[in-house]
Image (cartoon, rainbow, N blue to C red):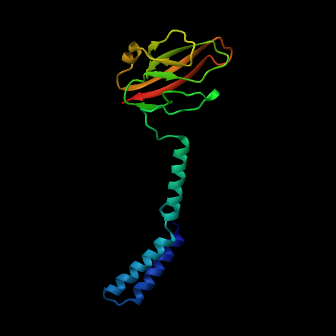
Amino acid sequence: MDNSDDQALRQRLEGVIRQAAPKPSAGHDKAILDAAEHYAAKHKPLLLRPHFALAATALLAVAIWQAGIFHDAAQPTTQRSAGQAIVWPLDNATLDASPTRLSWPTQASANGYRVTIYDDAANSLFESEWLDANEYVLPTSAANAIKQTGRYFWIVELQGTSANTRLGPYWFTIE
């Protein structure tokens, strides 16, 4: 609000006050309130206008829906990546317990995969043997290593490829 707006409001309010009876009255109070409401409606910030708030809410809802942010962590929700394969658990997923399996996109030039799980300080907690498939069911030793609440990540090393040497990191949190 600039100085000219303040001056315009002051002049309008002074005019209303001069027109009203010298003693406070319901009419005087109503005139003051009407003038203030008129000014406030004219200068209401864009964010407080109902049509803007409704449009912004709808846009946010569409963006969240498109991003797939809302999902049930207990159900494997797909995250598409190269080759349209599933990454599970999703990157930055929040889980109730240690995951029982990990999956990642198949890499055409890879002839083997090795999974390594780390805590948030990058301490290696578990490393698999070399695998032929792009999915790994975690053994009890791996689940025990990550059963505590906290933040973890995992990577997949690729064997026999000259392009990417690994996939990830894929983060998850256990609450």
**Going 38% across and 14% down the picture, which residue do you hit?**
140
Horizontal relation, residue 115 to residue 175: left or right = right
**Going 52% across and 69% down the picture, which residue do you hit?**
3
User: Relative to 1, is 16 above or below?
Assistant: below
Q: Viewer-proximal residue, 57 or 31?
A: 57
Horizontal relation, residue 83 to residue 44: left or right = right
Residue 146 in percent (x, y) is at 39, 20
User: In which quadrant is the C terminus drawn?
Assistant: top left
**Going 50% across and 17% down the picture, which residue do you hit?**
136
Residue 78 in percent (x, y) is at 53, 32
Q: Looking at the image, which residue sits at the far top?
A: 129
User: Relative to 56, is 169 above or below?
Assistant: above
Q: Viewer-proximal residue, 103 or 153?
A: 103
Q: Is residue 49 visible?
A: no
Q: Viewer-proximal residue, 74 or 69?
A: 74
User: Relative to 18, is 69 above or below?
Assistant: above
**Going 59% across and 27% down the picture, which residue do you hit?**
85
User: Relative to 78, is 130 above or below?
Assistant: above
Q: Is residue 28 visible?
A: yes
Counting labels gives 0
Residue 154 in percent (x, y) is at 49, 21
